[in-house]
Amino acid sequence: MRSRLNGLQEQREHLCARLVEPTVVGVVTALVAAYWATSSILIHRAFHSNGWDLGLLHQVLWNSARGRLFDYSFRDISYAGDHWQPFLLTLAPLEWLQGGPEGLLIVQAIFLAAAAIPLYAGARAVEVGRGGAAALAGAYLLGLGAARSVSFDFHIEAFAPLFAFTALWGLARGRRVVFVAAVLVILTLKEDGALLTLALSWIGWFGFKERLSAATAGVATIYMFLATSVIIPYFRGADLNPFVERYGYLGDSPAGVLGGMATRPDLVLSQLARPEAALAIAIVLASVVLLPLLVPRLLPPLAMVTLLPLLSKGPAQGSLELHYLLVPATVAMAVAIIAAGDLARRGPSALAGPLSAAIQRIWPFLLLGVPALLWMLGSPLPPSFAADLDRFDVDHHASVAQKFIREIPAGAIVSAQSPFVPHLSEREDVFQFPRVLDAEFVLLDEFGPIPTEDLARGYGDCLAALPRLGFDEVRREDGITLWRKVRPAESVPEAPRECSGQRPSAT
């Protein structure tokens, strides 16, 4: 009788694992994806998305879908000279379906939320238990990395968690083809995707003894060198080196930056000692309740993907704001899954001290509670305390702005303030003001945000020069102004070059 009851119990558990668990995980994932997509679309429709990056990336995709691969008009180079992101071309069907910028935001939300599925499966594969796997998946969905990414335009890095957790699942299940395929796809996301592939290769070698990890690490190293030292410089030409922009104090190339890190530790420590850097590191570790500290052998890859961005002089990247937190948080979660598996297999002995048994019992609750607290205090999405609800309000001003957008002919060359650019990016040429060049229309909003970089590039001087550049104001309403070019430009020496200059000749 007892053996029969045990058999029934096993059947129920098997049924739960085969049907109930996937259904619950799928439903939660779908709900979160819908929430993230709705939030992103509301931000966009309220005119709080940005030229850099939603407008820029959508224009690149729109041009690429029409055969002009990686063309954009934000700089006088190919986008491939700015970032190497061949994976972006796989999204071209969205443009054939006329998905627009909102299509990108929806796909981003779906892929970002879908990462919870292989995460949960990978956690179950390393035997953390049903409750532990649910806590790990919940912590990811509540993470600030995902919330910040959703609230700030579209970035190809949002696809990284899905492939990273798929690679982890492949390692846990012994599916070598899945692991290799996933980490190689990550390389195509962006030139620095090689860092994530290297991190996952380290985890594969030291966490699962996967010998192919050495090969994937070698491929990632070669790929990163080719992308940053050959491909991007080829398309960029003599334009500004991105390493100078972000890491100029250490070097002007990948090798130069590594050399600077080795020879000038004082500069490295000074950059990492900033309060915003320390806060970013604390958030990465707190989001997984310090679980990575239990597996010191896996800390080097986490340190690599966390500390290297923090060395950047870019304000957002150097503090892991916006979307820059996502990859470090993803690696932290991957390491936390392995640490949780060690806890489950080894029991209280995996921790030292009299409280070890209690910690083992409560870590799943902490893993949900701490990210939930961080989310409530710092998430840019409602209903957190830090959310700016005005960013989600499609109000009268947004309705007026949409009317102005409709007045501009399709195909016309436009220069627009940052929030307008994503709504005007379905054209071969769109500039972010004060880049005007040969624009036929200029659209500005005195109440809209002006990026600091645009102010530094002479936004005010270019605005004052518009009449002498041949533009007349043709409509004004609710602080929004539409200008149209009606006569040849005069010489305006005091105006910024890109405001009054002609389009550079193709080389």
Image: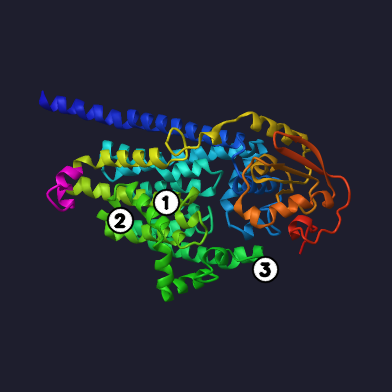
Sequence-earlier tag: 1 or 3 = 1
Horizontal side, residue 151 vs residue 354: left or right: right
Sequence-earlier tag: 1 or 2 = 1
Residue 159 placed where, x, y %?
49, 46
Residue 445 placed where, x, y %?
69, 41
Q: 61 or 464, which lies in front?
A: 464
Please tell me in which quadrant of the rendered image residue 385 appears. Answer: top left
Q: Identify the residue at horizontal 67%, vertical 48% (top origin).
A: 64
Residue named by callout 2: 207
Crowd class of label 3 (few under 14; some 14 to 19; many from 20; radius 10 Å): few
Residue 179 placed where, x, y %?
41, 51
Crowd class of label 1 (few under 14; some 14 to 19; many from 20; radius 10 Å): few
Crowd class of label 2 (few under 14; some 14 to 19; many from 20; radius 10 Å): some
Q: Is residue 9 above or below residue 312?
A: above
- Residue type at mark 2: give it: Gly
Sequence-earlier tag: 3 or 2 = 2
Please say which color scheme the image uses: rainbow
Residue named by callout 3: 238
Q: Is residue 157 magenta?
A: no
* Labelled disc at residue 177: 1
